Amino acid sequence: MNIKAPPGTFDIIPQDTHENWHDSYLWAHAESIFRELSRRFGYEEIRTPIFERAELFQRGVGESSDIVLKEMYTFEDKGKRLMALRPEGTAPVLRAFIEHHLHAQSTLHKLFYIAPMFRYERAQAGRYRQHHQFGAEAIGNDTPEQDVEMIDLACSVYKELGLENLKIQLNSIGDLESRTAFRVELKKFLHPSLNKLSEDSQRRYEINPLRILDSKDPGDQEILIGAPSILDFLDQASCARFKRVQALLDDLELNYEVNPRLVRGLDYYVETVFEITSGDLGAQNSIGGGGRYNGLLKKLGGPDLPCIGFATGIERIILTLLKQGIATPKPMGPTIFLIGLDQDAKKACFHILHKLRQKGISAQMDFSTRKLPKLMQYADSIGAQHVAVIGENELSSGMVDIKELSTGNIKKHELNALHEIFQKIQTRSVWT
Ligand code: HAM
């Protein structure tokens, strides 16, 4: 029997063309940008287990979210505890924050993660059962500036990656009181058309009617024409914050669109919410999203600190990158490729190879019995910068010709000093 990866999952593997979104070099490229931007914005890395007690997500993400209702991978472990594969990163970050008393260390905490998430969704292009997120959470600051810093971080990541044709959608869903009042009005508005709503929306009508607002169903969208707007229900403080957030975004020249229908699918959000969509992703066009979630830390048993965060799907980033034909840096081949022509030369090459690598130089040789022309072809195909062919003559003279493949230039060097010569050459990093 041929065992394949489970549906909705995939392998990330090295590929020669670097044009397939499964290519591990593309992933390493994106991840290096996440790390660099996190450093620039002052976010530190956090890693949490891929499984947690299911209760964390039931309480954290919310009983009425699709993630908890329909999509969690839960299992009972041998100790009869109900566990869940992590469907999202925010609740685990807060769990770890509380468990390690991080609040005692400083007043502001800025954390990032790059991690796989698991949701039992109907798999399709851009939607997977294991997907990966780069996410960031800022804990301890409640200012509009912090809201905008988070949006700026998201946009900076996309900009650095070269992505275009993205839209920031922005909304404020106010505090709990405003939302309760809005919920009543929205239900009143929808009630006469209840039977005409899609099955999903009918189910949401009782448990989370706000989610009907971002239904993609065309019939639902028609019914929603003329629906009340959450923005008319915000209290003075929420209105002032929302205005300030917009003014700060204007100041940074980050273009956005206010979308009063944007509510996001997780129950923990309050006040500022945002989503970034890509015009090149088809139906699954949300490339990243986030918002403020004051109150969640306290609900999970921690101190009452304000929080905001966002996460972006790495699959969707890479799909957009390829769709837009954005050139990504190609991985560099070895600085030198060694070819030994006979057994003695191969033995000497093996020793030199070790010495070069100890000095930090990327060096390779082929351990097979392939002949010189094939080995030269191979060195070229892996992008080797230099080749040294070593035989009887080189061993007896102690000198070897080093050929630079890009120019064809040849220079003679001392065999025993190769590591010193290449140490001078090797100053470039893998991604330059
Ligand atoms: P989310 O919107 O559920 O938010 O997911 C964030 C991003 O992950 C989405 O915009 C999308 O790019 C990607 N994504 C989600 N589900 C899938 C899937 N099945 N396949 C591929 N990509 C997917 C959260 O998870 C929140 N924890 C974000 C957050 C952090 N809010 C505050 N802090």
Image (cartoon, rainbow, N blue to C red):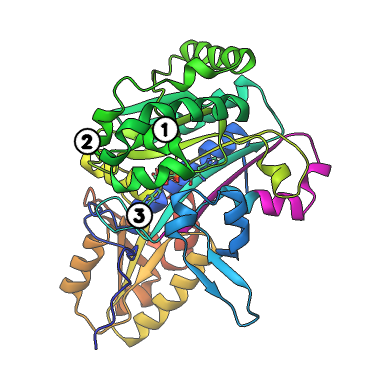
Q: Residue 53: give x, y in percent of width and height.
A: 62, 64
Decide: few, some or many residues near mark 3? Use Cα within 10 Å; few <14, some 14-19, many ≥20.
many
Residue at horizontal 46%, vertical 12%? 250
Q: Residue 165: give x, y in percent of width and height.
A: 28, 28
Which residue is the extreme one toward the right? 104
Q: Is residue 80 left or right of residue 152?
A: right
Spatial CA distance of label 3 from label 1 is 27 Å
Q: Residue 336: give x, y in percent of width and height.
A: 36, 61
- Tell me the SS state at disc 1: strand
Q: Are marks 2 and 3 in contact (CB under 8 Å)?
A: no
Residue type of the residue flagged with mark 1: Glu
Residue, disc 2:
218
Q: Are marks 2 and 1 in contact (CB under 8 Å)?
A: no
Residue, disc 3:
25
Tell which of 417 and 85 is nearer to you: 85
Q: Quadrant of the N terminus?
A: bottom left
Q: Magenta residues, as a range?
A: 94-119
Q: Quadrant of the C terminus?
A: top left
Residue type of the residue flagged with mark 2: Pro
Decide: few, some or many residues near mark 1? Use Cα within 10 Å; few <14, some 14-19, many ≥20.
many
Spatial CA distance of label 2 from label 1 is 20 Å
Q: Is residue 127 left or right of residue 430?
A: left
Q: Is residue 109 magenta?
A: yes
Q: How many marks?
A: 3
The answer to whether residue 149 is visible is no
Distance from mark 1 CB to nearest ligand 1 atom below 8 Å: yes
67 vs 371: above or below? above
Ranked by sequence position, the earlier of labels 3 and 1 is: 3
Which numbered circle lies on residue 123?
Answer: none
Q: Residue 354: give x, y in percent of width and height.
A: 49, 72
Residue, disc 1:
275
Tell which of 240 and 320 is nearer to you: 240
